Image (cartoon, helix red, strand yellow):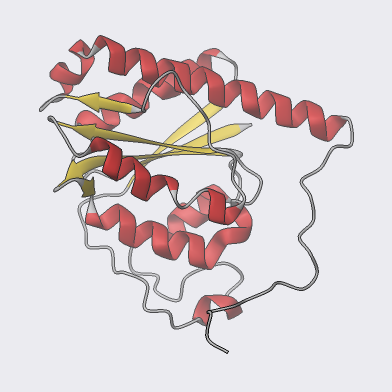
Amino acid sequence: MRVLLLNGSPHERGCTHTALAEAAGAIEAEGIETKLFWIGKEAVRGCVACLACRKLDGRCVYGDDVVNAFLDEAETSDGFIFGSPVYYASPNGSILAMLDRVFYAGAAQFRGKPGASVVSARRAGTTASLDALNKYFPINGMPIVPTQYWPMVHGNKPDDVRQDKEGMQIMRTLGRNMAWILKCFEAGKAAGILYPDAEELREWTNFVR
């Protein structure tokens, strides 16, 4: 089993990485592999709703950024944690652009797999940012991993985050809970309990008749 952790910050070893690394350490202590995936500093284009991904086996038509590389990693991952800094009380624009395309093109790779999000802020905007990130999970059939409080850390630099004792504990709790859920899922599969099939006919309505 493996958990893929997405660092949505342009700073590879900044505050968001510090939070994710703490969660990853707790996951690995439970015998589960982790991989940190950095979004990088290059531009990530937003989804243009071209629908070309429908013909590309779960990949985006635009191959000039990190989206398809992340989808390649997601295909062999069992759980996900998305991390973002807080910009103007919202997640980083690059991670939102990326996740729009990741989930639109590769939704089937996430269905039934547990997910969680964490955010890093100097002071405020954390709950609004978590709300935005957490919306990707239920629409794709992903159970959201709980922790002991909102999964956030505070600080202006990595050393500040490490001094956020509650935030670091929240990350460790999140990691252990992720590992527990993955082990429960494995036990369920071994007992023949599989993710439910969707209804054959998907209903689409836009409230205009």
Residue name at image x 33 percent, y 69 percent? 64
Task: State the quadrant of the N terminus.
Answer: top right
Q: Vertical placement of 165 versus 77: above or below?
A: above
Q: Which of these two is toward me, 167 or 206?
A: 206
Horizontal side of 112 relative to 127 (left or right) equals right
Q: Position of residue 50 (x, y in %)?
A: 44, 83
Q: Vertical placement of 170 versus 195: above or below?
A: above
Residue name at image x 32 percent, y 62 percent? 97
Q: Position of residue 15 (x, y in %)?
A: 21, 29
Residue that lies at the very extreme toward the bottom in this rendered image:
209
Q: Vertical placement of 171 versus 125: above or below?
A: above
Horizontal side of 97 relative to 43 (left or right) equals right
- Can I make out residue 13 in this image? no
Horizontal side of 32 relative to 126 (left or right) equals right
Q: Position of residue 208 (x, y in %)?
A: 52, 86
- Can I make out residue 160 in this image? yes
Residue name at image x 51 percent, y 48 percent? 137
Q: Position of residue 77 (x, y in %)?
A: 58, 42
Task: State the quadrant of the C terminus.
Answer: bottom right
